[in-house]
Image (cartoon, rainbow, N blue to C red):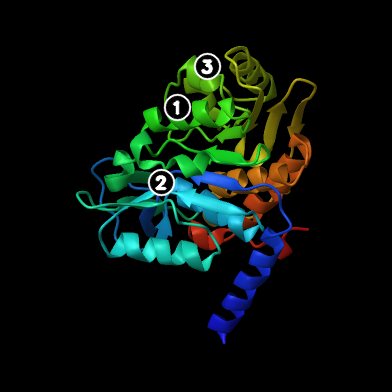
């Protein structure tokens, strides 16, 4: 029965896709997440006994693609998996979500990516990623057809693939008139050549500090960091501030958008769900403020559930 319901949901979403003019092209990582939920996070050198083990599909690119698809986004996902059971299962799952995986690549020499995640009783986490095939996704793997787009199509990327690939895509997509959204995670310095290609960047506090050398701890410092990013060429900035909400800065608006408080169980995919939802809303013609409100709602639901892709809500759950 569950299989029939999933198939019906898949068909319904495919019908909805046909009404959209915009595609969301997610280019990024796919991992298998191995999660242990324990009372606390271990200190260096400490071994903790007890906890629950889960193995889930993950990776920031995959998480964002699934989040966008479940919210009725018309998603194409370009990723690189290993020639192994993890990679085959990942592609199967993306297909079941109604995601176009026709441009994804299989790496015959490297394993699929794996992430080891520890989650404490407050929902906080620490993550170590072995990128595997994600680390070999190059510009030569991305087919020219990916860039044959309508100008309303959007590109969404993260930094679990080589930054050179991200920069190549951003330059090519933006030169074609498409909007490029970058979630700059994991945090690293980025060139102004890349930043100047971005329609929107979505760092958290730590990532904003690394990008701007401005420590972000309140609304005032978030505004300073966002202003610096706009000086570097980014058109619009949204800095996520956890339970405090998200600060947005555009050419016309500077505003903190709060979230509805929830009891967090697992924050692993909060940022990914936020970015997937944000991109869907913008692809539907919402302005950035409306999109952030929508994304906050989706991320708020995701943190009340365990898992990465498993925590992503469906459109009918967003009120």
Foreground disc of the pair 3, 2: 2
Q: Position of residue 266 (x, y in %)?
A: 52, 55
- Rounded to the nearest angstrom, the CA distance separating label 1 from label 2 is 15 Å
Circle 1 SS class: helix
Label 1, on which residue? 167
Q: Position of residue 215 (x, y in %)?
A: 54, 19
171 left or right of 199 in image: left
Looking at marks 3 and 2 on the same chain, the residue that comes earlier in the sequence is marked by 2
Circle 2 SS class: loop
Which quadrant, please, contains the C terminus?
Answer: bottom right
In terms of depth relative to the viewer, which is nearer, 200 or 95?
95
Q: Residue at x 59, y 43 (%)?
A: 275
Q: Are marks 3 and 2 in contact (CB under 8 Å)?
A: no
| Mark 3 closeness class: few <14, some 14–19, many ≥20 residues within 10 Å | some
Q: Residue at x 61, y 45 (%)?
A: 274
Circle 3 SS class: helix
- Rounded to the nearest angstrom, the CA distance separating label 3 from label 2 is 25 Å
- Rounded to the nearest angstrom, the CA distance separating label 1 from label 3 is 18 Å
Give the mark count.
Answer: 3
Marking on residue 212:
3
Q: Is residue 228 above or below residue 90?
A: above
Q: Position of residue 189 (x, y in %)?
A: 43, 21
Marking on residue 29:
2
Which quadrant, please, contains the N terminus?
Answer: bottom right
In terms of depth relative to the viewer, which is nearer, 139 or 292?
139
| Mark 2 closeness class: few <14, some 14–19, many ≥20 residues within 10 Å | many
Residue 4 visible? The answer is yes
Looking at marks 1 and 3 on the same chain, the residue that comes earlier in the sequence is marked by 1
Foreground disc of the pair 1, 2: 1
């Amino acid at each position: 029965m569950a299989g029939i319901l999933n198939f019906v949901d898949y068909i319904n979403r495919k019908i909805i896709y046909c009404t959209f003019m915009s595609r969301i092209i997610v280019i990024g990582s796919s991992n298998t997440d191995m999660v242990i939920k324990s009372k606390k996070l271990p200190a260096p050198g400490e071994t903790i006994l007890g906890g629950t083990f889960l193995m889930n599909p993950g990776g920031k690119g995959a998480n964002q693609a699934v989040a966008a698809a479940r919210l009725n986004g018309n998603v194409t996902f370009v990723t690189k998996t290993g020639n192994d059971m993890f990679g085959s299962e990942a592609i199967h799952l993306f297909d079941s979500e109604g995601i176009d995986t026709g441009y994804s690549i299989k790496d015959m020499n490297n394993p699929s990516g794996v992430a080891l995640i520890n989650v404490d009783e407050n929902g906080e986490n620490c993550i170590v990623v072995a990128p595997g095939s994600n680390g070999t996704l190059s510009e030569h793997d991305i087919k020219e057809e990916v860039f044959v787009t309508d100008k309303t199509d959007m590109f969404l990327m993260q930094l679990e693939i080589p930054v050179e690939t991200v920069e190549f895509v951003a330059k090519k997509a933006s030169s074609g008139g498409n909007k490029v959204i970058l979630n700059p995670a994991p945090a690293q310095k980025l060139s102004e050549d890349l930043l100047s290609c971005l329609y929107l960047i979505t760092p958290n506090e730590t990532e904003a500090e690394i990008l701007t050398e401005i420590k972000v701890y309140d609304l005032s410092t978030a505004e300073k960091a966002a202003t610096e990013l706009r000086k570097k060429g980014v058109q619009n900035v949204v800095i996520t501030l956890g339970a405090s909400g998200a600060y947005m800065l555009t050419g016309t608006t500077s505003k903190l958008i709060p979230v509805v408080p929830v009891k967090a169980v697992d924050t692993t995919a909060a940022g990914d769900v936020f970015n997937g939802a944000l991109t869907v809303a913008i692809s539907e013609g919402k302005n950035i403020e409306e999109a952030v409100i929508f994304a906050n709602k989706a991320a708020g639901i995701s943190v009340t559930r365990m898992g990465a892709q498993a925590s992503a809500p469906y459109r009918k759950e967003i009120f």
